Structures are given as structure tokens and as C-alpha cells.
Image (cartoon, grey):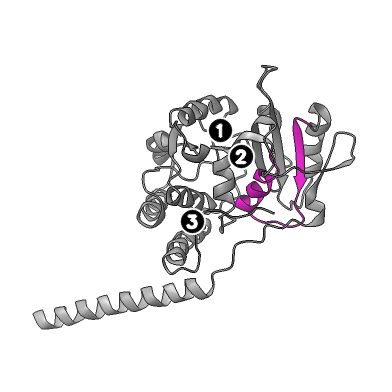
Amino acid sequence: MAPVLLQLAVLGVALAAAALILISFVAFITATEMPHLQRHEEEKFFLNARGQREALPSIQDSPTKQLSVVVPSYNEEKRCKPSLILLKQDPTFTYEVIIVDDGSKDQTSKVAFKYCQKYGSDKVRVITLVKNRGKGGAIRMGVFSSRGKKILMADADGATKFPDIEKLEKGLNDLQPWPDQMAIACGSRAHLEKESIAQRSYFRTLLMYGFHFLVWFLCVKGIRDTQCGFKLLTREAASRTFSSLHIERWAFDVELLYIAQFFKIPIAEIAVNWTEIEGSKLVPFWSWLQMGKDLLFIRLRYLTGAWRLEQTRKVN
């Protein structure tokens, strides 16, 4: 009996090794080059409050605002609430809100432009992408068009309250001195995990723990919640990480933090308030399956050299 079990064990290990080699090969040959950083001609401009076209700035320019808030929006005409962000009353604090319409099929751009008309295009700008790129791609386009010394990623639905930025700012400052002026503060919902588990089915809870394990095992160590859409980056950290990003859809946060850890950019994880808003684009099983595949492929593509991280990369 023992020799049979040993043979089965050896066969199982051999099959697992063969499967890993096959998956690595598939990951390597299907790896795309760095997503093209050039914009469509229409994406180089925004409409000011008078409806006139103006050229967008570049992240390579010197910052002229203290903060840029980048809000990715896809079919968000009913949930787009940038007015929740416009809460800073201190006239000495300069900021902008950049709403990136990620190729929406509804009236997202028109709804967002009303805020531009109300508050002025120095405060609110709308970038309309020609086609859908994914949340990561939309945020990257906003980051590359920003004017802030610090850049905040925030979801359009207002699930995380904007006043929590003060927590992120403190977390960022506590990381000083920043190497090469680079640092990241990640909003986190990990402290709410017990409460959310009580409201979830066992299947969704299993999916959540499985995803967290894959993130830790394959890509990012030390960050409990990589997916919270509330992250604050210094301008230099945003330029370095988003210039190296390949993933443009749901798992882009994981690659972003993987890149940050590769470059030894200090990261703080800060507990923030969070409210679940109806209308999420995530389909629990299939979206998590896609993210799981992306996590495996991120790791394998970097390991096999299909993707490489360069110390510097020009942003067009």
C-alpha cells in the first residue's frame, strides 16, 4: 500500500509542477507590453466652465496645488458626488478634483461637468476617455493630468468620507523622511472585517479570505486591505508607480503596491470610515476569479521577466 501512495504522491507533485510550468508559459507569452501611455487627441484637453477646450497639464510639470483628488467614474451618473469632496473651507488650502469618465455609456460626463460649471474648472475638471480602460487606467490618466503635490484616489460613490484624508495625511507625514520624496498612505477597511463577515454569506467570506491569502502569498506583504479605493500618494510616488503599471482593471491596486514595495517606497495602512454604497460594479464570484488570475499572472510575469521594473520611465 505504501509504495502505491508514494507513487501517487510523486505523480501529484509532477502534475502540479507541470501545471505551474504550463501556467508560467501562458503568463509569459500572453504578457502585453506596458500599456500605451499616449493619449487619444481628445483626451489631451478638458472643458473649462465656459465650455472651451484647454490643454491638460502633465505630472512632469511642477505642482501648483497642494492636493489633487482623482475620481474614476464609469456609468456613475447616479452616484457621482464630487460635492462631498469639496469640503475644505481653508482658503489657503489649494486643491482640485479630477473626475475621469472611463468611457461611460450614460451621462456621467454631463453630470460631472455641472460641478465644473458650479465650482469652476480650477477646482473641478472632467476628463472623458474615448474608450473604457478600467479603473486603474482611468486613475492613471487622472494622475498624469494632476497638479497636486499630493494625489488622492477616491471612489465616485463617496463610500469613504473625504474628511478621513486628514488621517491619511498624518499617516503619510509619520513616514518621513521620504526617500526621493516618495510615500503612500492606504486607507484600510481591515478593522471593519469582523462586522462585514457577520453580514456576508459563508461563500463570500471564503472568497474574501482566499483573495487576501493570494495577495499576501503572491504579491504584497504587510498590507491587510489592498483594495480600498482611498489612497494618498506623494506626487513623486504616484509618478513612479503609475508609470510602471500594467494592470488597468480590478487588481491594479495590488500591482501598484507590489511596484511600491519593489522600489522600497514606504507605505502606511490607515483605518478609515467606510460605507457600502449600492450599485457596485463587482460581480462577487467572477470578479474575484478574475482578480485571482491577475494576482497569479502578476507574480509569474515579474518572475519570468515578461514584465520588468525600470528605475525611471518617461511619461508621455
Q: What is the quadrant of the C terminus in the image?
A: bottom right
Which residue of the protein is positioned furthest toward the left in this rendering? Answer: 2
Assign a secondary structure to mark 2: loop
Q: What is the quadrant of the N terminus in the image?
A: bottom left
Mark found first going from the N terminus, 1 or 3: 1
Q: Marks 2 and 1: CB-CB under 8 Å?
A: yes
Which quadrant holds residue 146? top right
Mark found first going from the N terminus, 2 or 1: 2
Q: Is residue 306 magenta?
A: no
Residue 45 located left or right of residue 185: right
Q: Amino acid at mark 1?
A: Thr
Residue pointed to by mark 2:
155
Q: Where residue 29 appears, x then y in whole percent?
A: 52, 75
Q: Where residue 11 appears, x then y in whole percent?
A: 24, 81
Please indicate, yes or no, whether residue 119 appears anywhere in the rendered image: yes
State the CA–CA distance, disc 2 to disc 1: 8 Å
Residue at horizontal 49%, vertical 69%? Answer: 306
Residue pointed to by mark 3:
288
Q: Where residue 61 appears, x then y in whole percent?
A: 69, 41
Residue at horizontal 62%, vertical 33%? Answer: 149
Q: Which residues are magenta?
A: 122-146
Residue 310 located left or right of residue 146: left
- Residue 65 vs 72, above or below: the answer is above
Assign a secondary structure to mark 3: helix
Q: Could you say which disc has been placed on residue 149 in the image?
A: none
**Which label sits in the foreground, 3 or 2?**
2
Residue pointed to by mark 1:
160
Q: Marks 3 and 2: CB-CB under 8 Å?
A: no
**Which label sits in the foreground, 1 or 3?**
1
Mark found first going from the N terminus, 3 or 2: 2
